[in-house]
Amino acid sequence: MQDEQHYSILLTHEELLFLIDTLKIPFVLGVGYSPVRQFESIEARRLISAGLNSLIARGFVQLPNLAGQSIQIESVLIAYMYVCATAKKVIQYARVNLTAESMTGFVHFGDHLSVIHSTPYPGVHCFTGAVALESIRDHLLHLFDSAVVSQNDDEIVTIPLRKLRQAAIFASDNNIAASIAELRDTGVKAGLADRIVGVLHSQRAKTVICRFVQNGEGDSFAETWACIENDTEAWFLDADGQEEEKALMHLELCTDRKLLYRIQEMLNFGSTNLEG
């Protein structure tokens, strides 16, 4: 029996579908519904059988020796699956890299155990148990490139969303002067407008983190923010307002202190605080 804390295990999609079906789990974020609901019956049986055979070969599943006995599944797999299926508090993250592999995943917060579910490779799922919030905090911090996180600079600007979008369109078309003018028209200082357009023009990655609570009647989103970066700096993006014409976008320079604060706030669902 493996220790559920800090133990990581890689599962193929077929192995995961077998576990979901056998444990009668209706739905898992990042995976979907039971294969019986997702696929035709013949294809579902093929996937479940492939997953079973693979887990048997790896030693995670044992078939019964006698009639009346049930399949034995490694307890850590059962624990991880049930946390992912039943956790009400979840953080979802995605880092889209334009020049490298993208990263997506979830953190499921159970009552006694949290599970990080990531997809390091296409068709491969990684599950890691974590009890200490510091472990989860460090996992999320690793999504960001420390080389472009500012150490002590502070800059915050607020721009109408439609103006920022237009500036981004100009920047993608290599019309840097028009992009800068679009931001200057909103009152952004000249040098600061140059920096923001520089990130819009040469953006290499965008990271989005969302925290929500599953209440059984649909997902109740608590908070979402994004961070865009180029080779020299990164900026947080926070939307304000839902009406297109009135919506604002707050841009805040990503510093090490503010990044740590934001991650810790994401981990605070109202009952736990991290000292940082």
Image (cartoon, grey):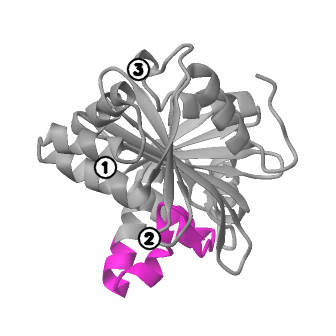
Of mark 2 and mark 1, the one earlier in the sequence is 1
Residue behind mark 1:
122
Is 264 located above or below residue 17 in the figure? above
Q: Is residue 206 magenta?
A: no
Q: Secondary structure at mark 1?
A: loop
Cα distance in 3D space between marks 3 and 2: 31 Å
Q: Position of residue 188 (x, y in %)?
A: 41, 38
Cα distance in 3D space between marks 2 and 1: 35 Å
Q: Residues within 10 Å of mark 1 (few under 14, many from 20)?
A: few
Q: Secondary structure at mark 3?
A: helix
The residue under label 3 is which amino acid type?
A: Val
The N terminus lies in which quarter of the figure?
top right
Which residue is situated farthest in the right direction here? 271
The C terminus lies in which quarter of the figure?
top right
Q: Position of residue 89 (x, y in %)?
A: 72, 57
- Give the quadrant of residue 82: bottom right
Of mark 3 and mark 2, the one earlier in the sequence is 3
Is 148 located above or below residue 198 in the figure? above
The residue under label 1 is which amino acid type?
A: Pro
The residue under label 2 is which amino acid type?
A: Glu
Region of the chain picked out in magenta, as a range: 18-46
Residue behind mark 2:
244
Answer yes or no: is residue 88 visible.
yes
Residue behind mark 3:
148
Is 262 located above or below residue 21 in the figure? above
- 259 with respect to 132 (left or right): left
Q: Residues within 10 Å of mark 2 (few under 14, many from 20)?
A: few
Answer yes or no: is residue 119 visible.
no
Which residue is at a point 44% across and 70% down the rendered structure image?
244
